[in-house]
Amino acid sequence: MADAALTRPPEAAADWTIPQGWDAYTPEDHATWDTLFARQVEMLPGRVTPEFMAGLDVLRLSRPGIPDFEELSDRLMKATGWQVVAVPGLVPDDVFFDHLANRRFVSGNFIRRPDQLDYLQEPDVFHDVFGHVPLLAHPVFADYMQAYGQGGQRAAAMGAIDRLSRLYWYTVEFGLVRSGDDLALFGAGIVSSRSESIFALDDPSPNRIGFDLRRVMRTRYRIDDFQQSYFVIDSFDDLLDQTLNTNFAPLYAELEGQPDHDPETILPDDRVFTRGTQAHARG
Ligand SMILES: [Fe+2]
């Protein structure tokens, strides 16, 4: 993810990349990865979209523990032409968009401590790699991520990053997708979190609403707790199609000056899958 007000640390290159430093990980770091990996892989089948489970194979490398980005990038490059590069943490928006537009996914290289298995505010290598990389091995989702980066570059020029970032938030990070008559998880913020993998799909608290690009771009989100609304895409093909075939410039202009929606609001035109109780948010 990206943040505008950042200064580049001296060890980072001009594009903010740093060496991953795989040899510096401790046995405890690798054990943390293996613990998180094992418990998500046990819980996700039947909850996560099958494309994610298929993409997980790209993470099964020659050594256990935290993936070596060089080996991971070799495998991902063969699948969809993407690479994974290490960065010191959050990077500025323009840097983030430039990497995505060139099919490079930026990942933090540090891993959470063993006492932080369940929650971490900053994205670590488990969130970034386990959460995001499997779907980057899927050709349509891989194209969507690049299209988002290119759209981000255009949005920056129009002062509309805040609005576009809601698309990323409600799809790449916290998206659900239809799977037959059911819903399935695909957002990285959900699938890398044991508790949110359960909450997003099973809890009566949040709304689950059919995805609508314009609607999503008007909806604020929460960064400090589980989401109050999740948006459900029909398919990755449809998401890519809408992203490529929407003319965003007039849309940004039109939305300028229109009020935002609160995260828990349900609108009359919404395609509602679940009307949430919001008990979690109120509790
Ligand atoms: Fe993320």
Image (cartoon, rainbow, N blue to C red):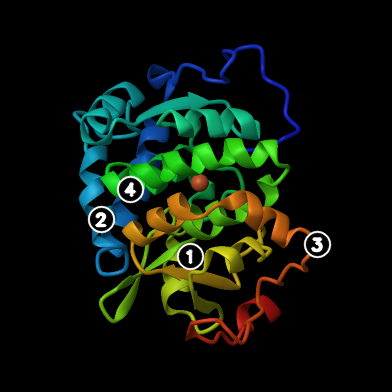
Task: Give the image location of residue 36, x and y in percent.
Answer: 38, 49
Which amino acid, by three-letter code, is at mark 2?
A: Glu
Q: Earlier in the sequence, mark 4 or mark 2?
A: 2
Which amino acid, by three-letter code, is at mark 3?
A: Gly
Q: Earlier in the sequence, mark 2 or mark 1?
A: 2
Which residue is nearer to you in this view: 251 or 149?
A: 251
Residue matched to label 3:
257
> Real-space Cα distance between discs 2 and 1?
19 Å
Residue matched to label 1:
196
Task: Give the image location of residue 147, x and y in percent.
Answer: 45, 42
- Which quadrant would residue 223 be assigned to in this image? bottom right
Residue matched to label 2:
51
> Real-space Cα distance between discs 4 and 2?
7 Å
- Write the residue at 59% across / 51% down: 248
Which amino acid, by three-letter code, is at mark 4?
A: Leu
Q: Earlier in the sequence, mark 2 or mark 3?
A: 2
- Which quadrant would residue 6 be assigned to in this image? top right
